[in-house]
C-alpha cells in the first residue's frame, strides 16, 4: 500500500458516511480510482480510529471526527473521547444541531455538546467542520458566531435548508455549502441553489441516507449531481466541477495559489 499524493482531484464528496456501507473498503478504492476527494464523516468518536485505518494509503479519502446530533442522547458520554482525539483530526463531522420532532427532547444536550465541540475546535484551530442543521439553522449560525472566535476553522453547512437571509448570514460567517442530489430534487430549493456564491459551493452525497437510482448514493454519483447543479445554474458542467475542486483547495488553505495536491498532502486524514 502506498501513500501516493493525489495527482489531480476531479470531484468532491464532502459528506459521505463511508462506514455505514457494507463495502466500505470498495468505496475508498473507487474514490481513488475516480479521483473523488471524499470526506468520510463519522457519527461517534469511537468510529474514528477504524475509519482512519481503512483510509490509510488512500489519499482521496479524508476522515472526520464526529458526534452526530441525533445520537447525542445516547452518546454524549463519548465527548471526552472526542476531545482526546481532536488533536489527530483535521476534519470534524458530523456535528451540529437537530430540532426535528424526533430529536427535540435532546436539544438542550445537543447544544451543550455542540458548544463544547466548537470551543475545542476553535482552541485547536484550523479544523474543517461538516455541520448538520435540521430545523436549527439560525441556532447553528449563532453558535458558530459565538464560539469560532479565532476564525481559523472553516464551517461547511451540509444539506443546508435555511432561508435566503440565513444563507447570507452563513456566507458572512465564512461558511461553505455542501450540496447533494436530494437538494437538487427539491424544487423549493432551486432559487437558493442558484443564488449561493459559486466560490462557496462543494458537493456531497450524504450516502447511504440519500438514494440514487433507488440504491444508496455513492461518491461515484457526484458527477451526476454536478451536472444537475450546472444545468440549474446555467453553466458548463466541466467549469463547475473545476470550480468545486478549486473551492476545496481555497477552503483548505487561505494561501492564494497553493496547489490542491500540496493541500491534500498536508491535510490528509490526521
Ligand atoms: Mn449525514
Image (cartoon, rainbow, N blue to C red):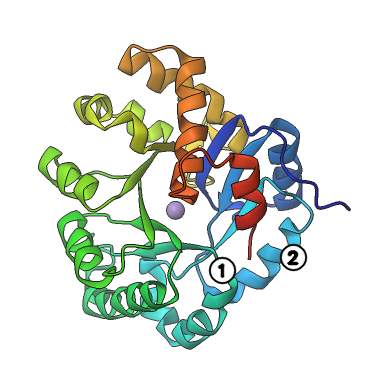
**Residue that numbered label 2 is attached to:** 53
Can residue 216 be seen?
A: no
Asked whether, in this view, residue 63 is left or right of residue 94, the answer is right
Front in this rendered view, residue 164 or 146: 146
Q: Quadrant of residue 96?
A: bottom left
Q: Residues within 10 Å of mark 2 (few under 14, many from 20)?
A: few
Q: Are marks 1 and 2 in contact (CB under 8 Å)?
A: no
**Residue that numbered label 1 is attached to:** 89
Front in this rendered view, residue 45 or 211: 45
Number of labels in the image equals 2
Can residue 18 be seen?
A: yes
Dot 1 or dot 2: first in sequence order is: 2
Q: Position of residue 40 (x, y in %)?
A: 58, 54
Viewer-nearest of labels 1 and 2? 1
Asked whether, in this view, residue 150 is left or right of residue 10, the answer is left
Q: Residue furthest right?
A: 1
Element under label 1? loop
Element under label 2? helix
Q: Quadrant of residue 126?
A: bottom left
Asked whether, in this view, residue 157 is left or right of residue 126, the answer is left
Front in this rendered view, residue 95 or 155: 155
Q: Residue furthest front?
A: 256
Reply above or below: 204 against 157.
above
Which residue is at 50% across, 45% downward? 14
Reply above or below: 10 against 1.
above
Q: Quadrant of residue 120?
A: bottom left
Q: Position of residue 174 (x, y in %)?
A: 28, 50
Amino acid at each position: 500500500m502506498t501513500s501516493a499524493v493525489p495527482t489531480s482531484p476531479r470531484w468532491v464528496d464532502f459528506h459521505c458516511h463511508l462506514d455505514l456501507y457494507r463495502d466500505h473498503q470498495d468505496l475508498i478504492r473507487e474514490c481513488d480510482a475516480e479521483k473523488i476527494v471524499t470526506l468520510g464523516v463519522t457519527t461517534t468518536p469511537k468510529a474514528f480510529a477504524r475509519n482512519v485505518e481503512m483510509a490509510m494509503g488512500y489519499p482521496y479519502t479524508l476522515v472526520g471526527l464526529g458526534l452526530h446530533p441525533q445520537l447525542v442522547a445516547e452518546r454524549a458520554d463519548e465527548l471526552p473521547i472526542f476531545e482526546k482525539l481532536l488533536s489527530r483530526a483535521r476534519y470534524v463531522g458530523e456535528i451540529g444541531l437537530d430540532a426535528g420532532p424526533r430529536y427535540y427532547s435532546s436539544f438542550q444536550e445537543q447544544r451543550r455538546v455542540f458548544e463544547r465541540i466548537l470551543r475545542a475546535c476553535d482552541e485547536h484551530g484550523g479544523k474543517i467542520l461538516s455541520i448538520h442543521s435540521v430545523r436549527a439553522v439560525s441556532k447553528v449560525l449563532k453558535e458558530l458566531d459565538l464560539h469560532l472566535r479565532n476564525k481559523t476553522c472553516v464551517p461547511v453547512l451540509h444539506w443546508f435548508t435555511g432561508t435566503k437571509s440565513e444563507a447570507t448570514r452563513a456566507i458572512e460567517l465564512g461558511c461553505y455549502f455542501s450540496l447533494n442530489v436530494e437538494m437538487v430534487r427539491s424544487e423549493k430549493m432551486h432559487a437558493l441553489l442558484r443564488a449561493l456564491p459559486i466560490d462557496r459551493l462543494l458537493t456531497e452525497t450524504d450516502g447511504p441516507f440519500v438514494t440514487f437510482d433507488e440504491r444508496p448514493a455513492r461518491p461515484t454519483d457526484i458527477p451526476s449531481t454536478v451536472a444537475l447543479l450546472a444545468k440549474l445554474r446555467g453553466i458548463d458542467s466541466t467549469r463547475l466541477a473545476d470550480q468545486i475542486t478549486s473551492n476545496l483547495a481555497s477552503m483548505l488553505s487561505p494561501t492564494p495559489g497553493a496547489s490542491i495536491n500540496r493541500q491534500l498532502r498536508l491535510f490528509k486524514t490526521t
